[in-house]
Image (cartoon, rainbow, N blue to C red):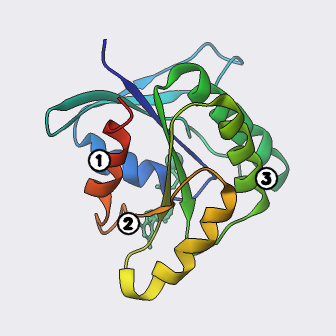
Amino acid sequence: SKPVVAIVGRPNVGKSTLFNVLAGDNIAIVKDTPGVTRDRIYADVNWLDYHFTLIDTGGIEPESKDIILSQMREQAQIAIDTADVIIFLTDVRQGLVDADAKVADMLRRSHKPVVLAVNKVDNFDKFLPDVYEFYNLGIGEPMPVSGASRLGIGDMLDAVVGHF
Ligand code: GDP
Ligand code: MG
């Protein structure tokens, strides 16, 4: 069966925007058992000669800061349990925050392949210097992307399919 790729990251980093760019029209919402896990959104993605299933683990995201970290842990666990490759999405505008580091620790311990993508780099000249701090997460080379401006997507997908 097709490899599974999951997008994990804090609320508002741009997971759904990136998901929609990659998925185009092939989106299906899968409702989980109430109270067990949150709804996930799936899509079939074709990239060059590669075909994979993409999951946006974000679902309905919390407003409250207290539950952001617990929901991120839950998301990350879903990704660890179901994905072959995890896209860990961060936000260059907000910078590296503690919740990123905690989830990065979880992902590192899982030994799953992770592609670390730093989103909202809409202007490479302006924001590229801010991307380097994400090396501190210790999960590999941070790849600058912009879902909204569709920048860096090809390089990121090359890294993803390189793990298949
Ligand atoms: P999610 O909560 O991680 O699913 O994030 P969303 O995809 O819903 O995006 C959160 C906010 O970030 C929205 O206001 C988006 O328009 C904005 N956003 C998403 N991607 C980008 C990007 O590449 N650049 C910029 N500047 N804003 C973005
Ligand atoms: Mg979302």
- Looking at the image, residue 25 lies above or below residue 121: above
Viewer-nearest of labels 1 and 2? 1
At x 38% / y 45%, what residue is drawn? 19
Is disc 2's CB within 8 Å of ligand 1? yes
Answer with left or right where residue 159 lies relative to residue 62: left
Point out residue 13 in the picture as x, y percentages from the top left corner. Answer: 55, 59
- Looking at the image, residue 95 lies above or below residue 90: below
Viewer-nearest of labels 1 and 3? 1
Amino acid bearing label 2: Ser
**Is 39 in front, or is 134?**
134
Mark 3 highlights which residue?
64
At x 74% / y 44%, what residue is drawn? 105
Is disc 3's CB within 8 Å of ligand 1? no
Mark 1 highlights which residue?
158
Amino acid bearing label 1: Asp
Mark 2 highlights which residue?
146
Answer with left or right where residue 144 lies relative to residue 116: left
Q: Tag 2, which secondary structure?
A: loop
Amino acid bearing label 3: Ser
- Looking at the image, residue 133 lies above or below residue 12: below
**Is 74 in front, or is 131?**
131
Is residue 4 visible in this depiction of the protein? yes
Q: Residues within 10 Å of mark 1 (few under 14, many from 20)?
A: few
* Quarter containing the N terminus: top left
Is residue 38 visible in this depiction of the protein? no
Point out residue 163 in the picture as x, y percentages from the top left corner. Answer: 39, 34
At x 35% / y 65%, what residue is drawn? 148
Mark with earlier residue (1, 2):
2
